[in-house]
Image (cartoon, rainbow, N blue to C red):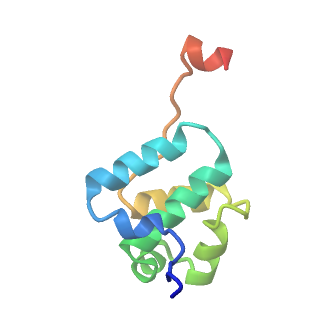
Amino acid sequence: MAVETREFDAARYLDNEEAIAAYLADATESGDAAEIAYALGVVARAKGMTDLSKQTGLSRQTLYKALSGEGNPELGTISKVADALGYRLSLVAKTQTDAAA
């Protein structure tokens, strides 16, 4: 008998604000725009893409595409999504360790 599996989906495990905050903090450490967009998409799915669409004024299709990690969303889109999810964008100075990497 074959074992049935399903693809891992982090959104299933983001069921509280602490988990979401930790997930986003980890995703932003690299500074990789695609990784950040993808992480916001995972959180958006965890919280509900329909509600996010209403809050941002962007269609669900636009959100899925922008937050897939494969697109290149505009900073304004990322900012709207972060705001609707209860976050804001900020820049943090690199430490000496970060600059050497």
Q: What percent of the width, then of the height, locates residue 81?
A: 49, 63
Query: Could one spot residue 88 in this view of the protein?
Result: no
Residue at 45% in and 69% down? 44
Q: Nearer the viewer, residue 58 or 15?
A: 15
**Nearest the eye: 13 or 3:** 3
Q: Position of residue 49 (x, y in %)?
A: 46, 78
Image quadrant containing the C terminus = top right
* Residue at the limit of the structure toward the front, as seen here: 1
Reply above or below: 69 against 9.
Answer: above
Let me know if residue 47 appears in the view. Answer: yes
Side of 63 relative to 100 (left or right): left
Total numbered labels? 0
Q: Position of residue 14 (x, y in %)?
A: 35, 62
Q: Quadrant of residue 15?
A: bottom left
User: For the point 51% across and 78% down, which residue is it?
Assistant: 6
Q: Residue placed at 55% from the left, 82% from the top?
A: 60
| Relative to 37, 20 lies left or right | left
At 47% from the left edge and 42% from the top edge, which residue is drawn? 26
